[in-house]
Image: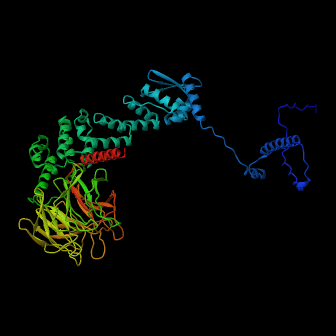
Amino acid sequence: MPYVPSPPQRNDSLPSYSRTAPPIPPAPVKRNSFQHKLRPASEIYYSVSRASSASLRKMAYDKALERPGSADSASMSSCPIFTHEVKTLFRDSFKTLLEFYESGHLCDVELKVGDKSFKCHRTVLACASLYFRAMFTSEMAESKQGVVTIYDIDENAMEKLIRFVYTSKISLTTDNVQSILYASSILQIEAVAQACCDFMKTHLHPSNCIDVRNFAEQHNRVELMKTVDEYILDHFLEITGSPDFKNMPVNLLERLVSSPDLHVETEEQVYDALMAWVNHDAEARGEHLPGLISHVKLALMDPTFLMEKVETAELIKKNHDCRDYLDEAKYYQMSLVSLVPDVKVTPRTCPRKAYAGVLFCVGGRGASGDPFKSTECYDVRRNKWFDVAQMHTRRRHVGVCSVNGLLYAVGGHDGTEHLSSGEVFDPKTNKWKEIHPMATFRRGIALASLGGPIYAVGGLDDSTCFSTVERYDILTDSWSSVASMTTPRGGVGIASLKGHIYAIGGNDGTSSLDKCERYDPYLNKWTPIGSMNKKRAGAGVAVLYGAIYVVGGFDDNSPLDSVERYDPKSDTWSVVNGMLCCRGGVGLDALGGKLYAVGGHDGSNYLNSVEAFDPITDTWTVMRGIQQFRAGAGVTACDSVLKNLRKVVRNTSERLQFLIGLVQY
């Protein structure tokens, strides 16, 4: 065999160490500290340097010998690992990529959009756009093409989106936001699409909201659709005056008028808006009228408007379904004055939240035992409670009622003594004003209005339960006595219905009562009526759809969750679905076709929870709770425009903050 010379070895090659484990150094020899000899500093320096250099070479050698699962690897796993991170690298890299894009360097694809073309980097596009990622990583023809044509996208919007993927910045205006939203939706650049939606939400106006709603629906932007729908519900009356309203799609219009959250002041406004929309093209839109009218609450309109405007409309007269809805409304209104038997309750007889009124919770007491003078108001559209002006006096077990849009609070206990005083709250000014006091000091009193005057019924002090009744004349600001009840009743509940006042339950000083009685103001006489199924005092009582409901209260031992309904025609009580928890000292009133049970005591704790009863479904639903845990509060609904009340409260708060600032200054 001929001689083959070995290949020359390069000077820069690493030495070929044998792959053997390094030798274990011998154990250090123990020396007496006195045996050490002093060495020159230079000798120490050079020996340390040689040792350090050898240690570094040994670490590199040992690292080269590491193998997964080996003993050497296991021994090295406990060694510290240093990770260096340059947090600005990605920004610097994208700055460089932007420079490459602007100069056309290293670009590997050209996008043609309209009359413009853009040289880009596939990787950058694929990182930001799911559309391009799918295009460039699949077997599509475009994945191998140097020039790719994009159709149906505005070239200016495309240019802004390309710069966005290189810079993460994009400028939105009212002129370009729709084209950019369209392009970003097609190219699946969700960050930009969401930014466009957020921008459009903040620039909604009655003149553009319908167009925005249609655009959002075309691109399936669900959150934007929801926001625009809420805006249209809040600004319906303003939108009906815009030219775009008459071009609103019928499905959107029907969705709006069927909503209980539609913000209108009267149902007549809804009817006028619908008829204007239909009459814009009566021949084509007439077929939609029955479906639209089915959501209008004709029964809640003014009788004169119903007879003179609705009944005489040609489109209504020609349609059988519309005439049926009109007849339903007539019968409902006649049932309110007992001209015909009660009719069935339907969603068309439930008022919309915007004009249903507001609910007030007044006074009461909590776990500390001290009575409150705070007043909370319920926003039924937003399911939220907010504070209004406080009373002048603390009051627990106070009687409350509303008359002509004003809230009256009378009697109660202030924590020290029983009260005969009263005060009235005006939602238009957010102020309380004192009224003339009653003749009797009492708590556990109940108030009701009947034909104008206010009646203060029953109550108790520390020694007596009262059967006496006083009547307050609003015009003269004076009290007078009327016939007393047949039974003393502290913690009584009362309701006014079809010309009579009903006194429900209470406590006669010995035990809770199931007995009830009725007052006739013309005869000035109380007459017993049918007894409840359970004894109860401190119960909530309210009228809804021609029936009296009584909820919760205390029997002689504990709080109750049971609910009963009284039919004045048959003079009988029937049990309905009970509340979700026991409530003694609960406040109750009807608002927007539902009953609201507020606060109370469950036998262990004061409550701030609220639940609402729907008579159509016979169910209770948990609502937003009041801010204070309280029982013995007065709860009543009041005919007041919530939007105006919120504005007055806000202005009052701003003035107060201003005055506080002046004092501090």
Q: Position of residue 373 (x, y in %)?
A: 28, 59
Q: Camera-side residue: 442 or 234?
A: 442
Question: Can residue 53 be seen in this snapshot?
Answer: yes
Q: Is residue 277 above or below residue 561?
A: above
Against 271, residue 528 (above or below) is below
Report the front residue among 599 and 355. Answer: 599
Q: Residue 570, can we see it?
A: no
Classify residue 47 by image quadrant. Answer: top right
- The x, y position of residue 649, in whole percent, is 28, 48
* Displayed quadrant of residue 596: bottom left
Q: Taking 440 as reference, is 291 above or below it? A: above
Please state the total of marks drawn on the protein image.
0
Quadrant of the snapshot with the C terminus: top left
Q: Position of residue 216 (x, y in %)?
A: 36, 38
Front-most of residues 361 and 16: 361
Would you say 593 lies left or right of 473 here?
A: right
- Name the image quarter holding the N terminus: top right
> Which residue is painted at 19% across and 34% down in the image?
280
Q: Residue furthest top?
A: 115
| Residue closest to the far bottom | 510
| Residue 608: x %, y % from top left | 33, 61
Render colour scheme? rainbow
Q: Is residue 654 left or right of residue 266?
A: right
